[in-house]
Amino acid sequence: MTSTIQGDGEYLGGNFTSLNNISRNRIARLYANGSLDETFNPGLGANDNIRIIAIQNDGKIIVDGFTFLMESQEIVLLAF
């Protein structure tokens, strides 16, 4: 699992398909208290493990891993 801090919470990436019984395919945002930020919608999420997650200066999320099926304008994909 990987994570990066942003403001009042953190983005979490890894090889999970849900958090707190809510579908979140391998990427989610948590508040500082550990609860799921349900306003962050990664669309379909990733279809394989996310190994690295980072935030650009413009606020876009960068993820790196294997192959992805994501539909979000907030996320930049680096797949290998």
Image: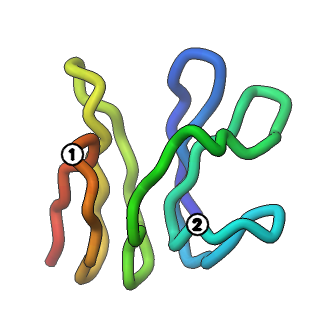
- The residue singled out by tag 2 in the image is 24
Identified at 27% across, 53% down, the residue is 72
Badge 2: how crowded within 10 Å, few (<14), some, or many (20+)?
Answer: many
Determine the secondary structure under disc 1.
loop
Q: Are marks 1 and 2 in contact (CB under 8 Å)?
A: no
Q: How many marks?
A: 2
* Residue visible at 75% across and 27% down in the picture: 32
Ranked by sequence position, the earlier of labels 1 and 2 is 2
Badge 2 marks a residue whose secondary structure is: loop
In-image side of 41 versus 16 (left or right): left
If the image is split into quadrants, where does the N terminus sit?
bottom right
The residue sitting at 33% across, 33% down in the picture is 55
**Residue 24: percent from the left, percent from the top?**
58, 66
- Across and down, in percent, residue 47 comes to 38, 83
Residue 27 image position (x, y, % from top left)? 50, 60
> Would you identify the image quadrant in which residue 43 lies?
bottom left
Mark drawn on residue 64? none
The C terminus lies in quadrant = bottom left
Q: Which residue is mark 1?
A: 73
CA distance separating discs 1 and 2 = 17 Å
Q: Is residue 73 above or below residue 23?
A: above
